[in-house]
Image: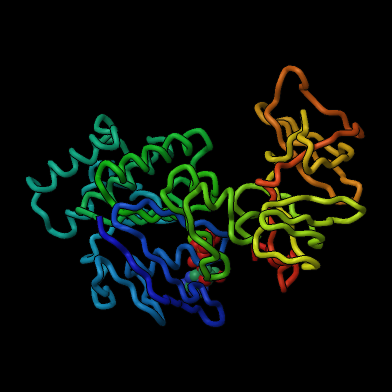
Amino acid sequence: MPEVKLVNVSKRYGRIKANDGINLTIKDKEYVSVIGPSGCGKTTLIRNIAGIIHPDEGEIFIDEESVSNVPIEDRRIGYVFQNIALFPHMNIWDNITYGPHVRGLPQQQTRPLALEMLDMIKIAARSEAYPHELSGGTQQKTAVARALISDARLLLLDEPLGALDVKVRTELRYELRRLVKDLRLTALHVTHDQEEAMSISDRVVVMKKGRIVEAGTPVSLYTRPQHTFTANFVGEANFLKGIVVETTADTSVVDIGSGVQLRANRGKETVDERVIVVFRPEFAVLDKPIEVNRLSGKVMDVLYSGSIIRVMIKLPNDETIAAKRIASFDKPMYDVSESVTISVSPDNVLVYPYPEEGLKKALALE
Ligand SMILES: Nc1ncnc2c1ncn2[C@@H]1O[C@H](COP(=O)(O)OP(=O)(O)OP(=O)(O)O)[C@@H](O)[C@H]1O
Ligand SMILES: [Mg+2]
């Protein structure tokens, strides 16, 4: 339910800036995910909001009220911890009712709440079971129920699905979203998994080294990332260095070496500027290439993963790019050394200024 606002929040551990000037508003009833490489400060961000740690600088507001002096138990937050499972010696019922129990809530008040929770996560029949008797997925659902039973309005989830196998993980992510939307909660969900973040969230926040790189809807982050780091971290992308050789009002032509040129929708770039051109492998059309942006190349490697064929192609400028297409019966495979022509629509070619720190550093996860 509530709106959460972080203003210039910083937290240091010795020389490490775990959170470095974070400004972020999570709107009422919004489902926001935070993604970023390991150690970029995701857990620190969540712990700051929960009140488990306190920022060195900056302020956090919940519903426009500063929570600097509000203790954890009064923030009405449900917290599902990273890697902290259920109490192993307690059955599901006792795990779920642990919070109300330690707060001294009488049984007759706790009971309907717990029944509601069990019903919500559809494990009422297993309330007597112990955690080790349950699947990982059910254990995590119980952890969510335990977090929500105390009338939480804000749900903080730190890698809630991290330990589960892919199938269960995929199923549970939709259940989590449904739960949050049905209960009209506000949720902040931390994950390593960019696909999980995109499919579950209203908005995704990308972090690197304690800072927010950018935030946006899944579609805008994927199709129009503002930074090369995001283009690389969210999904997969090809990065080619080049120089702008021509611009019109709405297009730019970038020379990427050995006479190979790519036309892109115009951004802010100007003629002679050093740039990086970026396109996603699935936007490189392998069959029936269009007239614009045709690139010829040689197949270096082919990866077949059922629905998708991923082909590595060496261009005449010696750069290797990835192209992806949906597998089909007409052309089940490509051969290594085969000559191919691909094309990329200018709409799908993005141009970025050449990063001051160099491309490798700009994309680096650490
Ligand atoms: N209590 C602490 N004492 C010292 N350093 C810490 C502490 N907590 C976090 N850090 C450091 O702060 C940085 C951010 O840590 P944090 O746990 O927030 O990262 P994260 O994004 O959650 O990483 P992961 O994806 O691996 O969980 C890391 O360099 C970490 O080592
Ligand atoms: Mg973490």
Determine the residue positioned at 66% across, 46% down.
348
Most foreground residue, 290 or 192: 290
Q: Is residue 276 above or below residue 321?
A: below
Q: Is residue 324 above or below residue 271?
A: above
Is residue 15 rendered to the left or right of residue 135? right
Name the quarter where the N terminus is drawn. Answer: bottom left
Quarter occupied by residue 154: bottom left
Quarter occupied by residue 114: top left
Residue 221: horizontal and vertical position, in percent?
Answer: 54, 52
Is residue 80 rendered to the left or right of residue 10? left
Name the quarter where the C terminus is drawn. Answer: bottom right
Determine the residue positioned at 19% across, 39% down.
116
Determine the residue positioned at 25% across, 37% down.
120
The colour scheme used to paint the residues is rainbow
Most foreground residue, 273 or 233: 273
Q: Is residue 352 visible?
A: yes
Is residue 159 rendered to the left or right of residue 123? right
Residue 335: horizontal and vertical position, in percent?
Answer: 87, 29
Residue 146: horizontal and vertical position, in percent?
Answer: 28, 49
Residue 62: horizontal and vertical position, in percent?
Answer: 27, 67
Is residue 19 rendered to the left or right of residue 53? right
How many discs appear?
0
Q: Is residue 71 above or below residue 259?
A: below
Quarter occupied by residue 231: bottom right
Most foreground residue, 342 or 222: 342
Name the outermost residue toward the top: 329
Q: Is residue 343 above or below residue 43?
A: above
Q: Is residue 95 visible?
A: no
Determine the residue positioned at 70% across, 25% down.
327
Most foreground residue, 274 or 11: 274
